[in-house]
Image (tube, helix red, strand yellow):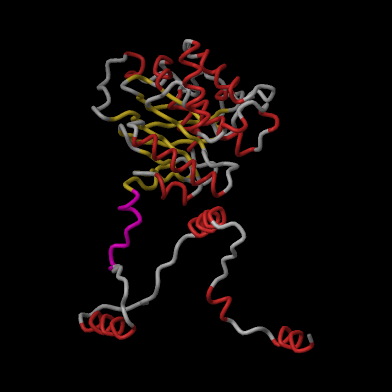
Amino acid sequence: MDTDSTAIADSEPTPSAAGGSGDESRPGVVIETRNLSKIYRDFWGRKKVHALKSLDIEVRQGEIFGLLGPNGSGKSTTIKLVLGLLFPSSGRVLVFDKDASETSKNERIGYLPEESYLYKFLTAEETLDFYGRLFDMSGAERKKRVDELIELVGLSGAKHRQLREYSKGMTRRVGLAQALINDPDLVLLDEPTTGLDPIGTREMKDLIKALRDRGKTVLLCSHQLADVQDVCDRVAILHQGELKELGRVSDLLKVQDVTEVHATGLSEEAKAEIADLIRRHGGDVKSIDNPTATMEDLFLNIVRESEARPGARRVSTNMASESPSEGDQEEGAGQ
């Protein structure tokens, strides 16, 4: 039995948390952790896992903030501490200027856990209506909100089917709709693209960015590097419970000692002249070549072209221009 797995404090509350008289979170800061630590203990109170060590981060209003790290780095523990599902061993968490232990703040929060625990015998409509009742929404308000969310997550054609018939990706979409039923100001997403195919993943990322555009604050927890890079404004990189890096994604990924130039319509002679100019100024030309897209972009473009032009086949130019193998030539000669 792990005494910390219950919502029972494994240590005495910090003075600021107990008294409520500590300095408040600064304006525009939705989540703030102060020297936050979490230790999981066994039945006898012995230290079992030091899941989080002196974490200091701020999540600002209207941004997508990513918690990035390998499994076991403390990401999910941080989210549970923000929700008040766990109590810190030391330090403090402030959410909307309130201590995370105050349950009233949760009315403004939407949460998508890593695994969606939904009633399989309910339909998508019934599931969302059930969660709307938990927020004491009126019947008319629930009906409007349920229809909006089902359309938003792309399940209009399957809204009357029981969840037991859903794929994992479809279940994930229902879970996201459930997290948004109360139109929250803060959305916590734990591995939101789990179980989604590339198209579903792109749609999920577009939806997350749309939430930010509507003024929502999003805390995203993931170990999928591409997902974090595509949608997050700032990231905190955790490893073994410690904060290793914090900053804007654009700043962290920028290679300071490399200059990149994008141009179109250059001849080979122009490329040679540019390379010579760079060398004359003391630079080192690594390569002058065409840029490459990501595999995700390639896949999605092929799917979109296939939907627009059914039956058309897209073949790489390099593949098409290669000469056939000797075996193919012999086979063709014998026909």
Q: Nearer the viewer, residue 297 or 253?
A: 297
Residue 272 to residue 237: above or below: below
Q: Is residue 236 visible?
A: yes
Residue 130 horizontal side relative to residue 17, left or right:
right
Give percent across and percent down for residue 62: 32, 34
What residue is rendered at 36% in x and 36% in y?
Answer: 212
What residue is rendered at 47% in x and 10% in y?
Answer: 138
Q: Nearer the viewer, residue 70 or 279?
A: 279
Give the residue furthest to the right.
Answer: 334
Residue 313 to residue 12: above or below: below
Q: Nearer the viewer, residue 283 or 147?
A: 147
Q: Is residue 258 visible?
A: no
What residue is rendered at 45% in x and 44% in y?
Answer: 68
Residue 9 to residue 238: above or below: above
Residue 209 horizontal side relative to residue 155, left or right:
left
Residue 164 horizontal side relative to residue 278, left or right:
right
Q: Quadrant of the N terminus?
A: top right
**Is 276 a magenta residue?**
no
Give percent across and percent down for residue 272: 30, 84
Q: Nearer the viewer, residue 335 or 85?
A: 335
Which residues are the magenta region? Answer: 249-259
